[in-house]
Image (tube, rainbow, N blue to C red):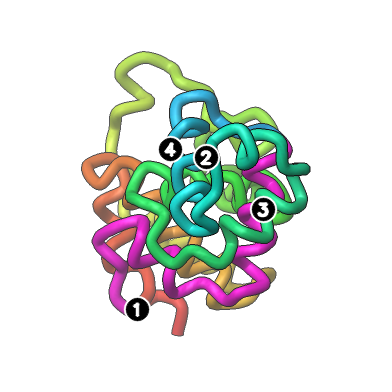
Amino acid sequence: MDFETTAVRLWKRLTPAERQAAAEAFWKEPPHEVLGSALGVLIKARHMRPQAARALAPDAQARILATVLDPGEAVAAALLVSLHLSSRRPLLTAFLDAVGLPHENGVLKEEGAASETPLAEEAARDGVRRLAESFPKNEVETYLNTLWLQDPDRWSILADSTSWLG
């Protein structure tokens, strides 16, 4: 599998169940920077008034958002992050532990210049192998692609990682 070059393309490749899980996680704690855009997606998808979209229960908002295949790049990226910070957090922690990056429950700790340093190939291979031993291949591929989309310079070594999965 080659990495998708946009969050929207990666979002489209998720299964309906994965998109639903991501949307549910998103609406539990919607990121403020994309909340307006996400509500705009609901409004457009269901041809509803803005106040009606805001008044929907989070589970209803999630059901609608999960069905939209092109929610826009920013919303798709936020949905992918929400997916990984909820039900897939063990995958994050396993990878970051394996590559030796400091984190707090799967969220990277930023430590100055060290946080900008690209990952070494050997560490990346070890991390990918550890994930391959413990998690479904499609989840590993989605996670690695999501990391790369967030910061292609820092995670550039991961672009070759799918060949390491076997």
Q: Secondary structure at mark 3?
A: helix
Q: Earlier in the sequence, mark 4 or mark 3?
A: 4
Q: Position of residue 52 (x, y in %)?
A: 64, 39
Q: Which mark is residue 39?
A: 2
| Three-letter residue code for mark 1 | Ser
Q: Residue at horizontal 66%, vertical 49%?
A: 61
Q: Residue at horizontal 57%, vertical 56%?
A: 65
Q: Are marks 4 and 3 in contact (CB under 8 Å)?
A: no
Disc nearest the viewer among 2 and 1: 2
Q: Report crowding for label 3: few under 14, some 14 to 19, many 20 or more residues within 10 A (C-alpha).
A: many
Q: Secondary structure at mark 2?
A: helix
Side (left or right) of 82 relative to 156? right
Q: Earlier in the sequence, mark 4 or mark 1?
A: 4
Q: Which mark is residue 76?
A: none
Q: Report crowding for label 4: few under 14, some 14 to 19, many 20 or more residues within 10 A (C-alpha).
A: some
Question: CA–CA distance between discs 4 and 3?
Answer: 14 Å
Q: Report crowding for label 2: few under 14, some 14 to 19, many 20 or more residues within 10 A (C-alpha).
A: some
Disc nearest the viewer among 4 and 1: 4
Q: Position of residue 102 (x, y in %)?
A: 55, 30
Can residue 89 be seen here?
no
Q: Which mark is residue 163?
A: 1
Q: Secondary structure at mark 1?
A: helix
Instruction: Residue under label 4, please give it.
Output: 37
Q: Nearer the viewer, residue 24 or 58?
A: 58
Q: Residue at horizontal 38%, vertical 74%?
A: 162
